[in-house]
Amino acid sequence: MWFVFLVIAVLYVMYLAIAIPAAAAVACAACALWIPVTYLRVLGRVLVTRPAWLPDWKRPPRAPGDSDPAVLHYLYGPALADADLTVRVAYDDGAGFLRRSAARNIVRSFESDVPWFTAPLGVGGAVGAAAGTAAGAAVAAGCALIHLLVVGLLAGLAWAAGTVLRGIDSAVLRIRHIKMFCPVCFEPVPYPGYVCPGDDRHPHHDVRPGRLGIVGRRCQCGEPMKTLLLFGSARMSAFCPHCDHLLEHRPGEAPEIVLPFFGAVGAGKTRLLFSIVTQLQAWDAAGQLTTEFADSVTKRELAVAEGILSSGETTWATPPELPRAHVIRLSSGRGTRILHMFDAAGERFVNPGRAEELRYLGTSRTFVLVIDPLSVRSGAVPPDRAYHRAHQTIQAMGVDLKTARLAVVFSRADMISAPDGDVAEWAVNELGLANLVRSVRIQFSEKSVFMCAAAVMEGTGMHPSVAALLRWMLAGEGVTLPAGPS
Amino acid sequence: MAFQQLYYTSCEHGLSGYSGFQFNAVSPRVSSAVMREVEDRTVYEPPARLVAGTRPGQKGAYPVAFSYGTSDATDAVIMSQVVFAGTDYSGRPGNYFAHALVTAAPAQDFGSLLPVELWRAELWRERPAGRTELPELTGPLPRGLVDRAATQAFLREQDAADVLPQLVTAVSKAMAGDRPVLLASRDIGEGIWWIAAVSYLLGEQLARRMTFTTYTHRPAHTRYHLTGVLPAALPPDAGTNFQLFDLTTGRTPGGRVHPLAAILSDTGIAAAAELWRQAAVFGPGTEAPFDDWLGPVSAAAGLLGRPLSAGETDEVARWLLAAAGSMPPPVAETALGIPLGQPDGALSDRRLAELHALARSLPAPGLTARLGLALAERSLTRLAAGQWASPVPLAGEAAEQARARALRIIGAATPATALAVLEWAAGSGLSLPEPELEEYGRTGLDPRAQAPELAGLLRQSAAVRRGLAERLASEPPAVAETFFSAPAGLFLERDDLAGQPALTELWLVQAAARGSADPLRAFDEICDIRALAGCSPLVDGELLARLWPHGCPPGQLAELVQAVTGPPAADVLTWFTAQIETVVTHGALGGGLPLLARALDGHLLLPLLPEADQRAIQEGTRTDELLVKARSAVRSGDASVFAGLFGAYAAADDDGRRNLRRELLPLLATADPLGPALRDCPAEVAAAFGRELANWLSPMRADTALARRVFTALGYPDVAGRPALAEPLRASLEQVRKWHRRDLGKLARVLTDDGLGRPFRAWRGEQQAGLGRRLFGADRRRE
């Protein structure tokens, strides 16, 4: 009898030796495969199919409060939220699988009609499931890690791409000598803000590559926007990030040149400005270059220039307010330039503290001092007073005078007999401006003295002195002006 | 204080020492900061069309820039008028003349004038002074061309109904820090009237805080809340950076009109002054922003007779709740009366309740009563319509009126409504008079209709219960019985039925029937009631049948028998006979039958019973005595008593055997030794005993002592020799095989002590022979 028991026992031990490892191996393989497969399946749903039943992000990524009204770039927040969602959903699915299948089958194996047969399978299954779960979880964690690494890598690449693109954009601007400038608040514009083309109530103060997009961004209204001038952002409506005024001259497309006119009250600054505009329009009419008023204010204020000069009317006094630039787009064979011409009232250079408000003086390289030779001995404000005030201001604003250029323009050339020789000598000898001339020679490395007649000559157009002055002013600025008299 | 004056123009001689734009003359002690600000604020440039096409001589065509602002540096008020001045000292066109007034005490210096009323006043100068010093200007200042009548006349000619509230809204937003307002019109002279209209509507305090200018050539740089501009000068971003009102195209910023702007526009220019004067009495202070005036102005409008909308009324109430604490009580009381003067329904119940609480805290007794009554009226109306309403704390006259209204409602109310009114009245502290409630119970309720809320109503009010009891007393007994058997009947209490003996009897019968009263006690009380009322007979068969509709238990029957002291009526005897027969038939050995038998012993009822019943009662008594004796004997180990019991069993009929068998089996289970006790045991009893043993010996119980007795009994010759006795015992012992090894071990030890170890091991050996079957699960499948 005991022999029978012994045989049965040996057989049963053999059964155990086979059944438990086999069950463990099967359960281990099933769990080890199922969990990563579940993770990858969920990842596919989250990233690709996005079924409606998928739960929401636990912590929806949000742009900072002061951010532009645009949608976050996928890699700067939503990608991490997706990774988190994938892990959560995969964990729930995996745990459900373990509960529904593995754990239940193990329990059933102990409750069957033949527990001596099934219980070893359950034991093996439990051990295998535990090992498989650990292995599967490790593989799934590896997949999640790879996912996160890919997200991080892509985010890093996106950041690098954005940085490179910003660098290229800045380099292109630098190579093209483009420095942007606000004609209203006089501040240099590092990069314009842009109004959403779809809804002008959505201003974007910094569209450059970043959290909200690399090559493009999407406004919260859904409208796509470009992020760099390289990609054509200049075609959108720009505004100054400092004062929010619209920059209608499409900044960033062409180098900008700031040309301040200064001088005493009634020196003829406005008239000279008008004559320059008229000269440019004449060249434009002759097809020698293209001139256009770059914004609506300039258009409104300079539309009357030629008429006033042609009629011989006196130009109107310039009110002593902070001037706004007259912005002109000038295109010639060699390229396009944007001229910001400032005509400040003479009073600004007389009253203390008023010249310092003209901050555009600090961004210019070429200055135009206008002197009315007829007023020098009339008891009006002496021209050297305006010059010295402007000079001090320019210097105080950090302009390197060794690279600055100054045109000293004596107006009313049509009303006085022009000197035969050197105009500067004439100014010293005839007008008694030795002190001013000496100062100019010492303080500016490049300077020139002109006699200008801001008048339209009958049959020949603008007085040729204006064209000569313009050629000198824009020399070296990349604009090819017609060589001869117009 | 006085206004400092400044003249600014392009002149040959002025304060700067050089010719050009400069201050021509100023009053003493004008600071340089103010001068700089005046210089900046008064910059003037004519419209482009006039620069191009009109000769400077035509001065009338040039817009006048009339401005009112506050200095950024000194907080002083700066007013200015800038006019085109044609050519300057040198003959150059583009000159302008600015005359500015500066004051640090505007409230004092302006007096009753609003800034806008200085438009084109005679004080403004348009030519430079011959000297550089100007006198200060003291008040009162002369009024200009603007006044309320002229402004009203202007508005009448315009289509202002839509624009004006929007303009006031936009200006209020600009004053609160939103985008400035641009007012574009073809004629700048038109703009001053719109500015005047807004100023008058805003009232004195706010109008003095509203800065404006009638004209600027460069609106992008404006520093004013409201800026007049020509359409041609509108910047491209006018629609986004400003709140643009382009009167030439009808364009407005849109959006919601501020409710205060709507009230002001609706009030009109002429009446606005009185409105603001009244609002100032309630006012939150001179520095309050526009939004804070909504409540006071709405209240003032209401006080001045303007019907308020529901929203405005609610706004007044909301403001009052916050502001009443800081007002003098009479003012607060006046203000509190304003929302009450509006059409009913303008305020929500919650708001009305909050106002009621406010009125009580002031205190304002009159308003408290009005509000309380209004709340009560509203609540009662809702209750009458079958809706819920929250209670209202009421006192005095309001309570009286509410009580009267509540009674009127109850008079014609359904039980549900009456219940709601009663609960509301209780919550509100209203005590409703009992006679009216009794009357409602008597006439307003229909006991035939069992409304679900009737129970609650009866629970709520004793007066209603009393009234209903009176009504039930007047109805046929069936109605009362039906009512008492329904859920609502539970809430009629015994005290409510005082003076209604018939109703009380019905109530007691129903109470006994549903188990809330002991039938015996009910029987006694009914007998007492009948005795007091002189009714006869005191007991009848119908009463007994109704009190014990499902039969009388032997215990109660035994007690009831004692109540029969004389020859019973036929129906009573019939009922008793039936009940005793039931007891005899179904038997109740060890309990009711002996009790009944004792009660009937020598009773006059016994001879009146059928003979079989008499015999059964006597037999039952004997068997009961045997059982009592057997229980005592079994405890002392005497098994001889079973012989008598088995004899009684054999002599009994089927019912008697069944009853006796029920008593015998537990006795046998406790008998020790069991073998002698089973001697002469009838086969039926043995089989039944075996079945019971199978239960008692289950593995769950594992009763070792019982198993020992059974196993030992199997060895008793009289048992072993009678298969009818032994087989049931052996079959029951199969349960022992399923016992846990520990219990089996315990049994084995006990039996070994009794010297039965070997037979027991042999018996267990039979069990091991079945291991193979168990191993393969055959047993489990059998289970």
Image (cartoon, helix red, strand yellow):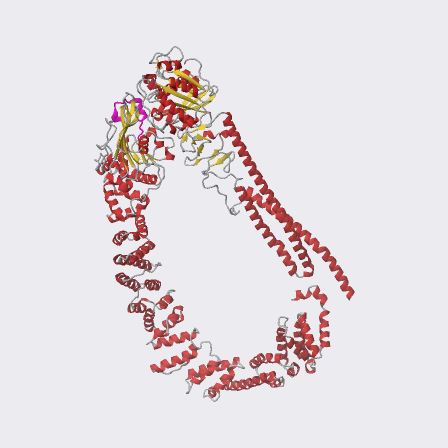
Q: Position of residue B687 (x, y in %)?
A: 63, 77
Answer above or below: position of A197 versus A451: below
Asked if residue A462 shows in the view, the reply is no
Residue B289, quarter of the rendered image: top left
Residue B765, quarter of the rendered image: bottom right
Region of the chain picked out in magenta, as a range? B42-61
Work out which residue is located at the far right of the displayed protein and give it.
Answer: A3
Quadrant the N terminus of chain B occupies: top left
Q: Position of residue B90 (x, y in %)?
A: 28, 20
Q: Position of residue B118 (x, y in %)?
A: 24, 35
Q: Relative to B6, is A81 on the left or the right? A: right
Q: Nearer the viewer, residue B468 or A169?
A: A169
Q: Nearer the viewer, residue A208 or B259?
A: A208
Quadrant the C terminus of chain B occupies: bottom right
Counting labels gives 0
Residue B26, quarter of the rendered image: top left
Answer above or below: position of A464 versus B589: above
Answer above or below: position of B594 versus B336: below
Q: Nearer the viewer, residue A12 or A473?
A: A473
Work out which residue is located at the far top of the displayed protein and give it.
Answer: A420
**Residue B49 highlighted magenta (yes or no):** yes
